[in-house]
C-alpha cells in the first residue's frame, strides 16, 4: 500500500507541472495587467515600474521558474489587485467554497444514490421512465440558467430564501441546489446502471433462493458490489463541483474561490489565477487518490502492491 501511494504521488508531479505550465501560458494570452489596472493616461515610466514591481518585465521562462520555485515554499506571490499574499486570499475564501461544495456533494449523494437504486429495482416501470427523464433533465439544464430561474421563481416572489450572499443556512439553499443538480442526476443514472449489472449476477439469484430478504440482498450483496463505479464517478465529479462553483458563486454572489477566480481573470491578476488553479488541481488529484484507495475497502479482492 505504501509503495503504491508513493508511486502515485510521483506520477502526480508531471501532471501538476503540466497544469501550472498551461495555466501560466494561457493567462498571459489574455492581456497585460498594467493596461487593465492602470488609467489610460498613466505615464510610461509608471507603467514600467508597475511591471517591475510584479516581475512582469522578466522573460516568460524566468517568470515561470520563479513562480514554481516560490510555490514549492508555499509562497504564491502577491495579488496584483489586492496587494496581499495570494495564499492569504485563497485561505480566506476557501471555507465558503468548501461549505458550498461539501453541502452540494452530500445533497447529491444522499438523493442520487437512493433514487438510482429505486429506478433500478423498478426497472421498466413507469417509475423508472419518469425518474430517468428527470435525471436526464437535471444533466441537461445549464447551471447558470438553473440558478437564475431559482432566483426569479423562488427567491424573489416567495422571499423565504436570500437571492445571494453568504450568512445563515438560508443563503446556502439555492446555491447548493444549483450546484448539486447535475451531480445528483449523474449519480442517479450511474447508480441505476451499476445496480442493474449486479442484479443479473448468479450470486444474487442464489442469495434470494436461500430466502434472504430483499433489504438484506440489496445492502449486503448488491450495493457493496455496485459501489466501485459509483465511487469512481463521485470522485471524478469533485473537479466538476469545484469548476461549477465558479458559475454558481458568480450567480449567487457567494464569496468563495470561484468568484475570486472570475474577478482575477477579469483584472488579469496572474498570481491569483495561477495559484488557484494549482491548489484546486492538487485537491482534485488528492481526492482521486483517496478514491482509488477506497476501492480496496469495498472490494477485498483489490490489492495494491
Image (cartoon, rainbow, N blue to C red):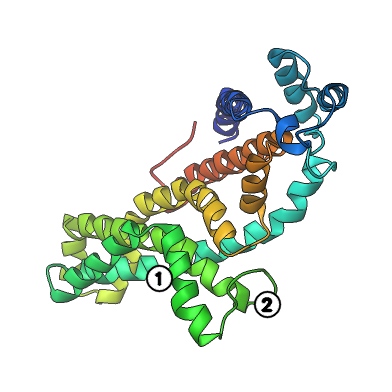
Position of 24 with respect to 248 (left or right) is: right
Query: In which image quadrant can residue 227 be found?
Result: bottom left
* Residue toward you, 2 or 150: 150
* Residue toward you, 24 or 1: 24
With respect to residue 172, does 264 lie above or below?
above
Residue beneath the point at 22% across and 66% down: 133
Position of 202 with respect to 291 (left or right) is: left
| Residue 97: numbered disc | none
With respect to residue 9, does 272 lie above or below?
below
User: How many dots with numbers?
Assistant: 2
**On the image, numbered disc 1 is attached to which residue?**
111
Which is more N-terminal, label 2 or label 1?
Answer: 1
Front tag of 1 and 2:
2
| Residue 168: numbered disc | 2
Q: Which residue lies most toward the left here?
A: 124
Label 1: element kind:
helix
Residue beneath the point at 81% across and 47% down: 88
Residue beneath the point at 59% across and 59% down: 249
With respect to residue 285, does 102 lie above or below?
below
- Tell me where residue 216 appears, x and y as whole percent: 31, 73
Q: Is residue 217 visible?
A: no
Q: Which residue lies most toward the front here?
A: 41
Residue beneath the point at 87% across and 21% down: 45
Image quarter in which the N terminus is found: top right
Query: In which image quadrant can residue 225 be found?
Result: bottom left
| Residue count near mark 1 (Cα–Cα under 10 Å), binned few <14, some 14–19, many ≥20 | some
Query: In which image quadrant can residue 182 be found?
Result: bottom left
- Tell me where residue 94 appears, x and y as whole percent: 70, 54
Amino acid at each position: 500500500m505504501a509503495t503504491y501511494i508513493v508511486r502515485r504521488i510521483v506520477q502526480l508531479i508531471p501532471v501538476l507541472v503540466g497544469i501550472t505550465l498551461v495555466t501560466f501560458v494561457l493567462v498571459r494570452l489574455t492581456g497585460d495587467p498594467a493596461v487593465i489596472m492602470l488609467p489610460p493616461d498613466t505615464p510610461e515610466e509608471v507603467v514600467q515600474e508597475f511591471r517591475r514591481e510584479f516581475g512582469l518585465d522578466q522573460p516568460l521562462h524566468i517568470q515561470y521558474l520563479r513562480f514554481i520555485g516560490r510555490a514549492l515554499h508555499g509562497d504564491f506571490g502577491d495579488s496584483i489587485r489586492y496587494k496581499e499574499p495570494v495564499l492569504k486570499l485563497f485561505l480566506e475564501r476557501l471555507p465558503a467554497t468548501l461549505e458550498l461544495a461539501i453541502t452540494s456533494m452530500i445533497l447529491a449523494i444522499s438523493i442520487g444514490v437512493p433514487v438510482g437504486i429505486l429506478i433500478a429495482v423498478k426497472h421498466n416501470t413507469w417509475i423508472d421512465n419518469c425518474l430517468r427523464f428527470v435525471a436526464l433533465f437535471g444533466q441537461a439544464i445549464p447551471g447558470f440558467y438553473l440558478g437564475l430561474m431559482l432566483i426569479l421563481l423562488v427567491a424573489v416572489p416567495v422571499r423565504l430564501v436570500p437571492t445571494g450572499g453568504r450568512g445563515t443556512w438560508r443563503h446556502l439553499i439555492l446555491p447548493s441546489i444549483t450546484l448539486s443538480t447535475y451531480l445528483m442526476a449523474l449519480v442517479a443514472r450511474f447508480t441505476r446502471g451499476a445496480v442493474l449489472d449486479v442484479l443479473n449476477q448468479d450470486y444474487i439469484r442464489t442469495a434470494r433462493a436461500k430466502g434472504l430478504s430483499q433489504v438484506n440482498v440489496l445492502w449486503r450483496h448488491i450495493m457493496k458490489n455496485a459501489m466501485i463505479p459509483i465511487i469512481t464517478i463521485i470522485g471524478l465529479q469533485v473537479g466538476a463541483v469545484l469548476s461549477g462553483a465558479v458559475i454558481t458563486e458568480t450567480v449567487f454572489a457567494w464569496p468563495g474561490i470561484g468568484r475570486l477566480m472570475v474577478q482575477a481573470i477579469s483584472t488579469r491578476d496572474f498570481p491569483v489565477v495561477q495559484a488557484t488553479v494549482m491548489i484546486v488541481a492538487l485537491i482534485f488529484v488528492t481526492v482521486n487518490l483517496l478514491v482509488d484507495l477506497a476501492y480496496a475497502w469495498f472490494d477485498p479482492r483489490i490489492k495494491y502492491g
